[in-house]
Image: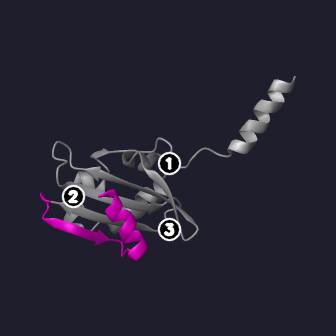
Amino acid sequence: MIRPLVLLAALALAGPPALAADIYPFDLPKKHPAAAAAWRKIVPKPYAHVGWVAKFAGVGTPMDAVTLDGKAFLAGNICKPHDCGGNFVAILVAVDGSRAYGMLRSEALKAVDAPFGAPGPKEIAILKARL
């Protein structure tokens, strides 16, 4: 009888699971559609046709949960398939879809830390850390 109570207490203390647990950039359209929509809105037109930049159609690692000004964000990156060396886009999106920021570093697209979504200094620091 004591064990179930201990288990319930442990679960209550553990809190909710981490926001970014097992969320990859390619998961955003399904798991966080508002965040994915916010991303699509800020991708500059010259890159809108580039799948790995605009549509998360590249190689990515699990995203990190980040709190910025009290708001929950997901931060991560994607690289160009079969050409990751020097071809990355960093992503920072509010889970609720209210804000999105990006930064592109790509030899193939001739972009050197090109920001989108008008990031401020805090956002730029987070984005650069993901490049």
* Residue drawn at point x = 81 percent, y = 27 percent: 4
Residue 105 placed where, x, y %?
21, 62
Left or right of 24, for residue 87: left
Question: Which kind of residue does numbered mark 3 sit on?
Answer: Ser
| Circle nearer the viewer, 3 or 2 | 3
* Rendered image: mark on residue 98: 3
- Whether 119 is among the magenta residues is yes
Quarter holding the N terminus?
Answer: top right
Q: Which of the pair 53/84 is nearer the observer?
A: 84
- Neighbor class of circle 3 (other Cα within 10 Å; few <14, some 14-19, many 20+) is some
Q: Amino acid at mark 2?
A: His
Mark in the foreground, 1 or 3: 1
In this rendering, the count of numbered labels is 3
Instruction: Look at the image and give the residue range highlighted in magenta.
Output: 107-131
Q: Tell me the residue that label 1 is attached to.
A: 20
**Sequence-first disc among 2 and 1:** 1
Q: Residues within 10 Å of mark 2 (few under 14, many from 20)?
A: few
Mark sitting earlier along the chain (1/3):
1
Q: Position of residue 113 (x, y in %)?
A: 24, 67
* Residue 41 in sight: no
Is 118 left, or right, of 4 in this rendering? left
- Residue under label 2, please give it: 49
Q: Are marks 1 and 3 in contact (CB under 8 Å)?
A: no
Residue at x 68% of width, y 43% of height: 14
Q: Position of residue 90 (x, y in %)?
A: 32, 59
Alpha carbon separation for disc pair 3 and 2: 23 Å
